[in-house]
């Protein structure tokens, strides 16, 4: 069995992957290009540097990020151990001192004899390896990835529209239907794949007013996306003229409301995001509004007054793969299971999600090298549900995804109380991941060097 592998990128995912491999007896060459080549966002040469906020979000099991962390702890995450060491007071959130956190990860990796940290920029791909180079993957490696996986496989910017939960949409105000009855997708049935929020002229004007006066997020200079028509923020479109949205994403033509038999003044459309129909995407609503502003402004839309946001909109620089089209179920090249990808480059979004896929990549590369099949947890767990999303999402509309309860398999029974429902999700997820760990002997493989 090969005992040496390459991990590219010493960020959150790469550090976690390298640790998982080393702790199972595999020698790792961990390539990190900093400080030889810096990214536009990182400031230090430390491994696992947090480029922006200092929080891994909630630890509560009734929060999607809290549940994901609980699952990762059962799998022995070094990133979460380091976060515990560096923790600062922040209520139920796992917030850290950035410096202490990155130093802890760096020291532990440096002290692990099976991991050799090499400071250089990797520009080609050779298995067995895990590529975890993140949202700011260097240009030369990005070229190699495109050459290996196909030109359309890697995007450089994301333009994300918010997703709301189906449960939170007011059915008395919206209707199902496709424009001219034509747009359909698998499983949508005759009614069409869209939910439509019709607006009167007054409602449209009120929405426009809220939108154009809302507060926008201004990030790093390198993050300023050169907008083209396909990813124009909805607020920028709205500022171009009072009718721009009505002739663009909110166009009402061909969308007759079956209840009145008439077309509305404007219509916001929501497209089904997942097979289970729990997650609905506001079509054309990519945005740079601040998160509280997204809640305030988009809840002005009729039918979305109580909307629960599962993902917020954003637009930033982000190298990420179209995983459903370009990768296998365990996030490897389709024609070589030993070339794995992990972290934000796979289309997950966020510190915790990136670390979690690094953890799984390390476990799976070890399994493959040991002659075992790669595995992913069931979609009743947050980790497994994220993997399912990256495997089964519609490649035509694929955009990065964070942990959220809309990704999980439904409970067998309908539960109205939101808190109780989340408690039941969490209880089931932890039970099932424990059983999955036992079945696949994941914890049984830890080697003596750990
Ligand atoms: C400006 C910015 C702000 C963000 N803010 C947040 C936030 O507040 N909260 C949040 O949850 N997420 C945030 N994110 C997303 C965040 O980057 C990810 O969640 C997380 O860092 C991804 O982990 P990763 O390991 O995939 O990538 P990274 O942590 O970025 O690690 C990738 C590593 O690969 C290295 N690398 C790149 N190319 C090469 C190469 N060719 N050879 C060798 N090494 C290479 C890089 O130097 C880097 O160290 C932000 C992203 C950006 C760009």
Image (cartoon, grey):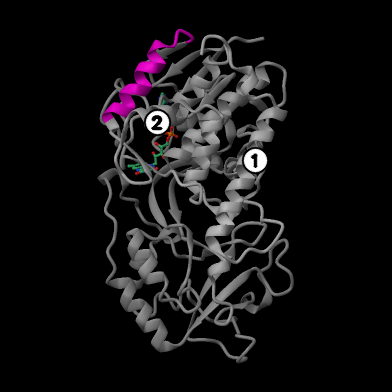
Q: Rounded to the nearest whole Å, what is the CA distance between mark 2 and mark 1?
A: 40 Å
- Does the numbered disc 2 mark a residue whose Cβ is under 8 Å from ligand 1? yes
Identify the residue at horizontal 53%, vertical 29% (top origin). Answer: 359
User: In which quadrant will I find the N terminus?
Assistant: top right
Q: How far across and down, in percent of the image, does residue 419 sit? A: 52, 59
Q: Of callouts 2 and 1, which one flags the residue occurring earlier in the amino acid sequence? A: 2
Please identify the quarter of the rendering in which residue 372 is found. top right
Closer to the eye: label 2 or 1: 1
Residue 107 visible in this rendered orientation of the protein: yes
Residue 33 visible in this rendered orientation of the protein: no
Please identify the quarter of the rendering in which residue 204 is found. bottom left
State the SS at label 2.
Answer: loop
Q: Is residue 23 above or below residue 192?
A: above
Q: Do the residues labelled 2 and 1 touch (CB within 8 Å)?
A: no
Disc 1 target residue: 431
Part of the protein shown in magenta: 99-114
Image-quarter location of ligand 1: top left
Disc 2 target residue: 138
State the SS at label 1.
Answer: helix
**In the visual, does 402 lie left or right of 10?**
right
Identify the residue at horizontal 50%, vertical 49% (top origin). Answer: 64
Mark 2 Cα shell of 10 Å, populated few (<14), some (14-19), many (≥20):
some
**In the visual, does 271 lie left or right of 246?**
right
Q: In this view, does 61 lie above or below 271?
A: above
Q: In this view, does 257 lie above or below 214?
A: below
Query: Quick one: 409 or 422, which is closer to the camera?
Result: 422
Query: Quick one: 99 or 293, which is closer to the camera?
Result: 99
Label drawn at residue 148 = none
């Amino acid at each position: 069995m090969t005992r040496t592998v390459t991990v590219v990128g010493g960020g959150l995912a790469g550090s976690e992957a390298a640790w998982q491999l080393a702790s199972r007896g595999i020698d790792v060459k961990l390539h990190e290009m900093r400080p030889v080549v810096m990214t536009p966002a990182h400031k230090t040469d430390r491994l696992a540097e947090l480029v922006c906020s200092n929080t891994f979000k909630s630890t509560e099991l009734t929060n999607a990020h809290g549940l994901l962390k609980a699952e990762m702890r059962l799998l022995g995450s070094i990133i979460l151990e380091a976060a515990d060491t560096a923790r600062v007071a922040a209520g139920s959130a796992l917030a850290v001192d950035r410096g202490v956190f990155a130093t802890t990860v760096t020291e532990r990796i440096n002290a692990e004899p099976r991991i050799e940290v090499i400071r250089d920029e990797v520009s080609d791909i050779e298995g067995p390896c895990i590529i975890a180079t993140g949202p700011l993957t260097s240009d030369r490696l990005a070229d190699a990835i495109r050459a290996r996986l196909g030109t359309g496989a890697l995007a450089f910017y994301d333009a994300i529209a918010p997703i709301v939960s189906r449960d939170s949409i007011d059915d008395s105000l919206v209707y199902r239907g496709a424009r001219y009855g034509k747009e359909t997708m698998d499983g949508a049935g005759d009614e069409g794949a869209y939910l439509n929020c019709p607006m009167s002229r007054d409602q449209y004007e009120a929405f426009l007013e809220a939108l154009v006066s809302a507060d926008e997020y201004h990030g790093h200079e390198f993050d300023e996306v050169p907008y083209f028509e396909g990813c124009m923020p909805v607020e920028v479109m709205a500022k171009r003229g009072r009718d721009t949205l009505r002739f663009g994403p909110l166009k009402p033509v061909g969308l007759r409301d079956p209840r009145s038999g008439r077309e509305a003044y404007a219509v916001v459309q929501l497209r089904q995001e997942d097979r289970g129909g729990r997650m609905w995407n506001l079509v054309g609503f990519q945005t740079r509004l601040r998160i509280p502003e997204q809640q305030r402004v988009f809840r002005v839309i009729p039918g979305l007054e109580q909307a629960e946001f599962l993902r917020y909109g954003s637009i930033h620089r982000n190298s990420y793969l179209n995983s459903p089209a370009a990768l296998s179920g365990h996030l490897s090249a389709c024609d070589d299971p030993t070339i794995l990808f992990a972290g934000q480059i796979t289309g997950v979004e966020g510190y915790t999600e990136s670390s979690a896929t690094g953890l799984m990549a390390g476990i799976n590369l070890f399994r493959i090298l040991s002659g075992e099949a790669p595995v992913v947890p069931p979609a009743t767990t947050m980790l497994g549900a994220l993997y399912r999303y990256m495997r089964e999402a519609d490649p035509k509309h694929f955009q990065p995804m964070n942990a959220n309860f809309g990704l999980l398999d439904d409970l067998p029974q309908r539960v109205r109380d939101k808190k109780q429902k989340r408690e039941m999700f969490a209880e089931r997820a932890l039970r099932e991941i424990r059983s999955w760990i036992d079945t696949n002997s994941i914890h049984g493989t830890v080697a003596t060097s750990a």
